[in-house]
Image (spheres, helix red, strand yellow):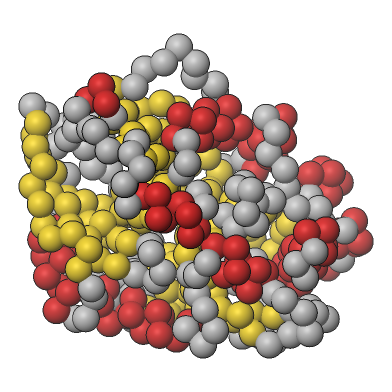
């Protein structure tokens, strides 16, 4: 595997204390009820390419895993093979969802020692895994809910993914839709837990608080939430942490917590260099996006100024636009991709902007509330 930097470009945040050098997101592992079918969805609907496989044919007796890749994004889809697998408990509680957010580091042993001595709870002690292609060292810690971080040290490994996996090379390989890397990953936590977990990332991993949004920033007439964006020093890993705030009705965060049965990853923002082309391709493959009222676009020019994209085309596809001091961004959000209204995706294209679309919050959350009303959970 290439050891080039995985995600876009560096943005240095001097407030962060980089005592753990981090090179980017290594992979994201989902626990799912049927990995074969989930892999087909991510291939067909989202353009991911088959990479590696582990299961009965490779000597793994309790689970099966399919690894898919699109540019710098790697997803692992894992399902249990036996009734006694602990994966079943995760599925019973949460449904399909993210279990592991793996971080590519220079030294997995050092990452484990630094985080655990600062109070992180151990998930996996440093372990050397090897095959004919070399070796990988992995270690891990618990974070919010049942989510864990695994630190991956792979400088001495030349294989496709990890030891124990074999190449997965089916005939069926739909084309990519232009997704490039994980821009950020958002976690939902319980009432009054945002500061606890923001402090956790600052204390155990050296992250800084890049930006904070309170209920005045993220609210509508009915619901509200609060959020802190935590980032490592080079900006390659950004974890916004959301918590509910008081409102007249049930917020999207409360709905998530109810159906996921606790804290977990709410969405991943996937970057593209051409959001219009990517969205057109995703829609053609069956991905459904939130509907944004047409009057949102009446004032886009006033807020963001002149941009090369045709506003009529953005309106046609429901793509949102926002600007900060460094440029502008375009973003759009899918409907939940699971039966439970939990996990969804954001597609984002940055044109210099380093923010998170604050100017779009009201329109976005009104669109989410409309979906909640349809589900009867608002």
The residue lying furthest to the front in this view is: 83
Quarter residue 157 falls in: top left
- In the picture, the quarter occupied by the C terminus is bottom right
> x, y (%) of residue 287?
68, 39
> x, y (%) of residue 374?
83, 58
Above or below: residue 293 compared with residue 96: below
Quarter residue 246 falls in: bottom right
Above or below: residue 215 compared with residue 22: below
Mark yes or no: residue 326 visible: no
Q: Residue at x 80, y 64 (%)?
A: 376
Q: Nearer the viewer, residue 282 or 315?
A: 282
Q: Residue at x 52, y 79 (%)?
A: 190
> x, y (%) of residue 97?
48, 52
Q: Nearer the viewer, residue 131 or 227?
A: 131
Q: Total label count?
A: 0
> x, y (%) of residue 78?
38, 40
């Amino acid at each position: 595997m290439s050891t080039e930097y995985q995600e876009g470009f560096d943005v240095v945040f001097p407030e962060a204390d980089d005592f753990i050098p981090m090179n980017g997101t290594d992979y994201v592992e989902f626990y799912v009820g049927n990995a074969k079918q989930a892999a087909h969805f991510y291939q067909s609907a989202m353009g991911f390419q088959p990479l590696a496989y582990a299961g009965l044919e490779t000597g793994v007796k309790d689970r099966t895993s399919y690894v898919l890749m699109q540019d710098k994004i790697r997803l692992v889809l894992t399902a249990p093979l036996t009734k006694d697998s602990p994966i079943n408990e995760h599925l019973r509680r949460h449904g399909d969802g993210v279990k592991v957010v793996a971080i590519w580091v220079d030294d997995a042993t050092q990452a484990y020692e630094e985080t655990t001595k600062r109070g992180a709870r151990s998930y996996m002690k440093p372990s050397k895994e090897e095959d004919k292609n070399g070796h990988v060292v992995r270690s891990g810690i618990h974070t919010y809910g049942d989510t864990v971080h695994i630190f991956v040290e792979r400088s001495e490994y030349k294989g496709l993914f990890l030891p124990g996996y074999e190449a997965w090379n089916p005939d069926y390989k739909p084309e990519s839709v232009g997704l490039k890397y994980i821009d950020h990953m958002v976690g939902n936590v319980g009432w009054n837990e945002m500061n606890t977990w923001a402090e956790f990332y600052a204390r155990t991993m050296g992250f800084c608080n890049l930006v904070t949004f309170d209920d005045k920033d993220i609210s509508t007439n009915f619901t509200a939430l609060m959020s802190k964006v935590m980032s490592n020093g080079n900006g390659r890993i950004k974890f916004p942490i959301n918590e509910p705030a008081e409102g007249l009705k049930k917020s999207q965060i409360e709905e998530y917590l109810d159906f996921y049965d606790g804290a977990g990853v709410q969405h991943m923002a996937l970057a593209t260099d051409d959001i219009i082309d990517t969205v057109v391709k995703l829609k053609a493959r069956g991905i459904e996006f939130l509907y944004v009222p047409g009057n949102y676009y009446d004032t886009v020019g006033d807020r963001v100024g002149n941009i090369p994209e045709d506003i009529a085309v953005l309106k046609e596809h429901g793509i949102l636009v926002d600007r900060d001091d460094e440029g502008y961004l375009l973003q759009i959000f899918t409907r939940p991709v699971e039966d439970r209204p939990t996990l969804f995706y954001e597609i984002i294209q940055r044109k210099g902007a380093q923010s998170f679309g604050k100017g779009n919050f009201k329109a976005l959350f009104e669109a989410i509330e409309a979906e909640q009303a349809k589900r009867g959970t608002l």
